């Protein structure tokens, strides 16, 4: 079968596995970095909620609310509900790590407010990428069963939409962190707080790089396997 062929095994080990290891390291790194700087209490005296509210108000986003969401590092901005949700480890925290994460989410709200191009593109392509991600493997498998390569390549194209989403996500996340750090600096936050937040956000950014690497590796693997089977 497709997933247990020799080609499938070697392409996974050589192409995908290194990217998966990178992703595992990035995940462990962001967790350890956050844990380290969650013990560093901000000298400003602000909570993560205070920082978010101040950023939103400075940009006239008084309508954007702040809510609590359960879980660790589940913080996110919901543009449809105009809500920034802060997780258990961030909500009400005075740590430099929590303030950095919260400011990052406020950065996403600012991106939407100013019409930042990449985030508008990401919002537009989400439905297409979701459909492509769902249909990709069934199309490829069906193409193999029917010995019909065009169906396999259609599945690869569908998978590529998910990879494209990961690619578009990079500038969105990097820009949100850049905005967050600039806002913290301009607001006169202590250098120690800003540096700690920067390290947390840099570690978080690496997880998006790793996710793109995994997606690209899987895309290349699928292309090689399908091409190999087509030649056969």
Image (cartoon, rainbow, N blue to C red):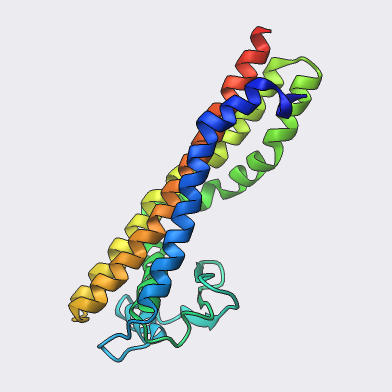
Residue 197, horizontal then vertical, whole percent: 31, 71
- Residue occupying the point 62% across, 33% down: 158
Q: How many marks?
A: 0
Residue 49 position by quadrant: bottom left
The outermost residue toward the top is 232
- Residue occupying the point 65% across, 26% down: 8
The outermost residue toward the bottom is 45
Q: Is residue 84 above or below residue 133?
A: below
Q: Is residue 114 above or below residue 37?
A: above
Q: Is residue 133 left or right of residue 18?
A: right
Q: Is residue 153 above or below residue 86?
A: above
Residue 150, horizontal then vertical, whole percent: 68, 17
Q: Is residue 32 left or right of residue 131?
A: left
- Residue occupying the point 56% across, 34% down: 218
Residue 205, horizontal then vertical, whole percent: 38, 56
**Image quadrant occupied by the C terminus:** top right
Q: Which of the two residues, 68 or 198, is positioned nearer the viewer here?
A: 198
Q: Which of the two residues, 12 or 64, is positioned nearer the viewer here?
A: 12
| Residue 119 in view (yes/no) | no
Q: Which of the two residues, 204 or 125, is positioned nearer the viewer here?
A: 204
Residue 74, horizontal then vertical, whole percent: 54, 70
| Residue 90 in view (yes/no) | yes
Q: Is residue 30 above or below residue 65?
A: above
**Image quadrant occupied by the N terminus:** top right
- Residue occupying the point 52% across, 44% down: 20
């Amino acid at each position: 079968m497709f997933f247990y062929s020799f080609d499938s095994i070697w392409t996974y080990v050589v192409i995908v596995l290194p990217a998966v290891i990178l992703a595992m390291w990035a995940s462990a790194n962001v967790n350890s970095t956050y844990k380290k700087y969650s013990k560093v209490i901000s000298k400003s005296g602000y909570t993560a909620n205070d920082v978010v509210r101040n950023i939103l108000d400075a940009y006239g986003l008084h309508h954007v609310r702040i809510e609590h969401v359960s879980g660790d590092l589940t913080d996110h901005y919901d543009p449809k509900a105009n809500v920034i949700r802060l997780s258990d480890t961030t909500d009400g925290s005075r740590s430099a790590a929590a303030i950095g994460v919260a400011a990052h989410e406020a950065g996403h709200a600012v991106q939407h407010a100013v019409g930042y191009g990449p985030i508008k593109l990401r919002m537009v392509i989400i439905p297409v990428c979701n459909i492509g991600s769902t249909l990709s493997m069934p199309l490829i498998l069906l193409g193999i069963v029917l010995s019909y390569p065009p169906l396999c390549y259609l599945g690869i194209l569908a998978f590529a939409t998910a990879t494209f989403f990961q690619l578009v996500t990079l500038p969105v996340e990097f820009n949100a962190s850049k905005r967050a750090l600039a806002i913290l600096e301009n607001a006169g936050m202590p250098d120690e707080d800003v540096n700690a937040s920067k390290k947390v956000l840099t570690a978080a950014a690496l997880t998006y790089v790793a996710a793109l690497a995994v997606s690209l590796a899987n895309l290349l693997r699928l292309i090689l396997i399908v091409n190999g089977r087509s030649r056969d």
